[in-house]
Amino acid sequence: MRYVLQLIIAVLVWGNLGVAQAADRASDNGSRESLRGIIGLGLVIEDISPDAAADGLSQEAIRTAVEQALRSKGVRLLTERTRSESAPYLYINVNTLKEELGLYAYSVNVDLKQLVGLLSMKNKKTWGATWSASVLGMVRQENLNQIVADAVEPLVNDFVNDFRSANPR
């Protein structure tokens, strides 16, 4: 796996050092339709790798940007007190890998997780991603914070647009 990542990094270095996006966006009607009727959602942001945290990327910066994007478009965020155990939540995962060249390869995943029923087992439910988008990229170490603006925010905005489409005011 490490060699595959090094190959990707080498290709990106020889090409453009900007953000290389490989978007995997679930914007079909089924994904959008799964957002209908949601009145609020929780927010879960995974921990940042120690290397990225030491170089300035913070979970709090990601949380602030995501919350602002959601609230500015009228998406109700549930707090720990107002969120039930079965309420859907937006899951944000930023994975980074620091290379010797002073570069970070990263992947950002944004998923809406909801309780879904299993057809094979009546009355059995589990958490599943009903909306998902992701991006891969590379950034120089000194621009590590750009991941928030260049990757996290656009994916969250895609989610908000689909959410608003499914839940017009």
Image (cartoon, rainbow, N blue to C red):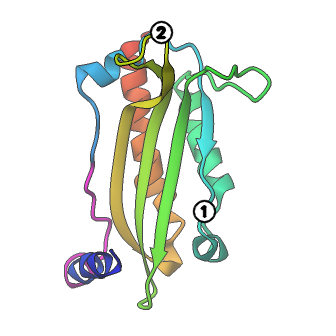
x, y percent for residue 111: 44, 38
With respect to residue 95, does 36 lie above or below? above
What type is the residue that disc 1 sits on?
Answer: Ile
Q: For the point 35% across and 19% down, which residue is it?
A: 120
Earlier residue among tags 2 and 1? 2
Which class describes the residues within 10 Å of circle 2: few (<14), some (14-19), or many (20+)? few
From the viewer's perspective, tell me whether residue 74 is left or right of residue 137. Answer: right
Report the magenta residues as a range.
12-23
User: Observer-nearest residue: 87 or 29?
Assistant: 87
C-alpha distance separating marks 2 and 1: 32 Å
61 magenta-colored: no
From the viewer's perspective, tell me whether residue 5 is left or right of residue 47. Answer: left
Circles 2, 1 touching at the beta carbon (< 8 Å)? no
Regarding mark 1 in the picture, which secondary structure is present there?
loop
x, y percent for residue 23: 27, 49
From the viewer's perspective, tell me whether residue 7 is left or right of residue 164. Answer: left
Number of on-image labels? 2
18 magenta-colored: yes
Q: Quarter-wise, where is residue 4 in the image?
A: bottom left
Taking the view exactly as shown, the residue that stands out farthest to the bottom is 100
Which class describes the residues within 10 Å of circle 1: few (<14), some (14-19), or many (20+)? some
Q: For the point 43% across and 54% down, which residue is it?
A: 108
What type is the residue that disc 2 sits on?
Answer: Gly
With respect to residue 103, does 61 lie above or below? above
Regarding mark 2 in the picture, which secondary structure is present there?
loop
Give the number of the disc on residue 37: 2
Q: Which residue in the protein does label 1 denote?
A: 48
With respect to residue 127, does 82 lie above or below? above
User: Observer-nearest residue: 6 or 85?
Assistant: 85
Q: Main secondary structure of the magenta part?
A: loop
x, y percent for residue 105: 39, 72
